[in-house]
Image (cartoon, rainbow, N blue to C red):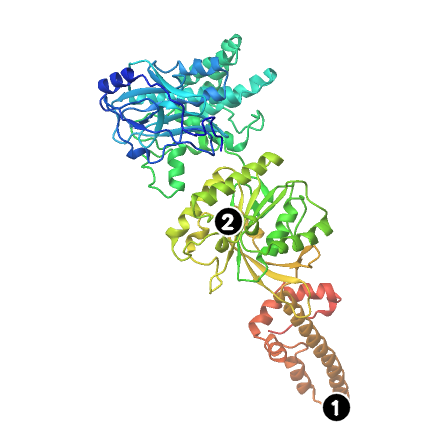
Amino acid sequence: MDIKQNGSTKAEPFHIDKNIITEVISKYKDLDIAITDPEWDEKKQNYKKVYYWKDKPKVNGAAALNSKQLIIRNTNEYPEVDWDIFKHLEPWQAQYIKDKLPKTFEFGRDGRGHSLYKVKNLPENPESTKSLELGARTLLEYRAAGSYSIFAGQLDKTSKATTAGKEIAEIDYKYLKKLFNRAAALAALTIITPGNKEVINNFLLAAAGEFYVNKILKTTTIKIFKSWLHLIKRTDRENETVKSIEGIYKSGRASNIFSKNYPVPISEAEKYQFREIVKRVGLKYEDKPTESMEAFEGMMNGSEEPQTKELKGYCLNEYIKLPIKVPKFLIERLFKENSINFISGPKGNGKTELILGFCNALVRGLNVLKYTCPEEYPITLIDGEMDPYDMVERNNLYIAELGPPKKDYFHIINYAQQLKQTIPDIKGNTGQQLILNYALKQEKLVGKKPIIVLDNLRSLSNYKENESDEWLPIGKWLVKMRGLGFTIIVVDHHGKEAKGPRGTSSKTDWANVSLLVTSDKEKGNPNMRMSVKFDKARGLKPDETDDFIAEYDFQGTWFVGDSKQKQSDEEFCKQIYDRITKQKAYSIKYLKSLDKDLVKGTVTKEAYETILKNHKQTPSQKDLAGQIGIAAGKVNRLMKKGGPYEQWCVLNSNKNTKGEVNE
């Protein structure tokens, strides 16, 4: 602990102007100012954390304020705007944006940084505290009910919060919110502007297009971009910029922040955050915003879903022109980007080995089984069950066969290396956020979003499997991750009846592909064999969803094996062929003998003709079924035109010897 010279961690005596405080609280009686002793936060090295802040007594005119700390407990009637943009922009830029809002009473470090307002015309359900972020940067905070700030007193060992002014500006709720949102959009726009002035045109098309596709009024967009030009010192481009924006709105054709043609050099997560900031510019505040990220996150956390007042629809002719990205296959004809996928099966049937096969192919851009991986994709594998050395032993076989993957392309999070050997439950916010944070970190390392593999569901959460409400927080989190651009593969166990993933049937409601894996052991075969069936195949064609046998040689190589059905069919075809051939040979010999008997006169001509008429040169399907010991229906299936028997004959004998079979 950093001890002061007098051996104390208490704040140095600080004089708070009692007259100003008294004047403010007497004039604004509903203002909630509380008094407390500064409390040292060893971790953050400051006095900003106030424990039990809701219980602190309100300040009154008689209280001694020296060496104390005053906090403001924000309300919807008296909210504040916290100007964090001063940390991320040049001081003059931040001040320019701040001046877009009415001048009012301020407090904070050196008497600035927090603007306090008195709001009128509050709606029934106002949006209270809201933080707008871009990457790891907090830009602006609208702090209302449920939050507090240091109003006056010690902030850390060298800085103090003071107040400035005596008048709290009164402002309409809707107007303040609109100004707040526009200020955030202007700040975000300035921060993400490329440093290279040569690409400013491309950036304008992507950024202004984002405003258009989110239905921001043209006049509002032009105002914001004019201010942006001032902030980047390019007012010389004002006429050109206005014409470009007018052209976008007139043509109805626009790019957006995710454009590949006009790339913006920020992460995918930051692009989603920027989009939400832009969306807020268009909010009307007739009630609580329903299109904000706050509402979306509320749904993800299981809170009440927002009440949508109007559904958004398009004429098909317009819909097909929307800037909707065409999803691409990560594994062709199997897994697409931005998708949720399941691989499930009974215990010990090879699910983890199969997913390791897919992962090792994906990180190298190699083919696997009957599938093609068109390019390399990073993997974040969260392993909640395997012995830590199993991952070493199994992956070494792939490395020996395929060579090592690129650096940082295959990351493994194993439970054994975590605090208390536990990965926080993915049903809760902590576990979900930790996984997202790690995936974003890996994305920064390799420049691509990693595919997130959860192996397995039961070991990563204690949710009640048979209750759909218990699954809902996990399912909504997976949907949120998909919305952020991630592909997820979930490994799960089968239920007792082995018809699909264990527990509630709602698990795969949001899934794109669900594969069912069961062991298909073969006597005398040292390889691992499993049957792979498609339980769900959204986005795949019927001929891409046939069942198949996946076979692994424990040397880093997977291949498609022959099913037992195919093997047994081949054996039956051989038996059919042998019996037909044998009866044909007997028939030829018999008919020759009959001809001799006719010549000798031992058989009459009438009897001869009757015998020929009733004689069968090949056995009937019913006879074959009885001889082989299988159902007549199965013989019929095998011997249909173009069926397994005909194919077997082509491969194994002269076509002329396959013969015909009597019905």
Kindly identify which residue carries mark 2.
Answer: 423
Residue in front for this viewpoint, 327 or 290: 290
Instruction: Choose between 570 and 185: the one closer to the eye.
Output: 185
> Which residue appears at 48% of the width and 31% of the height?
272
Q: x, y percentage for residue 593?
A: 76, 85
Left or right of 387 in this view: 557: right
Residue 136 drawn at (x, y percent): 50, 30
Q: Which mark is residue 242?
A: none
Q: SS class of the residue under badge 1?
A: loop
In the rendered structure, the answer to whether residue 341 lies left or right of residue 393 reads left
The Cα atoms of the two marked residues, 2 and 1, are separated by 95 Å
Image height of 576 relative to 559, above or below: below
Quadrant of the image occupied by residue 528: bottom right
Work out which residue is located at the far bottom of the displayed protein and give it: 602
For mark 1, what is the residue?
601
Considering depth in this image, is 589 or 340 the residue closer to the camera? 340
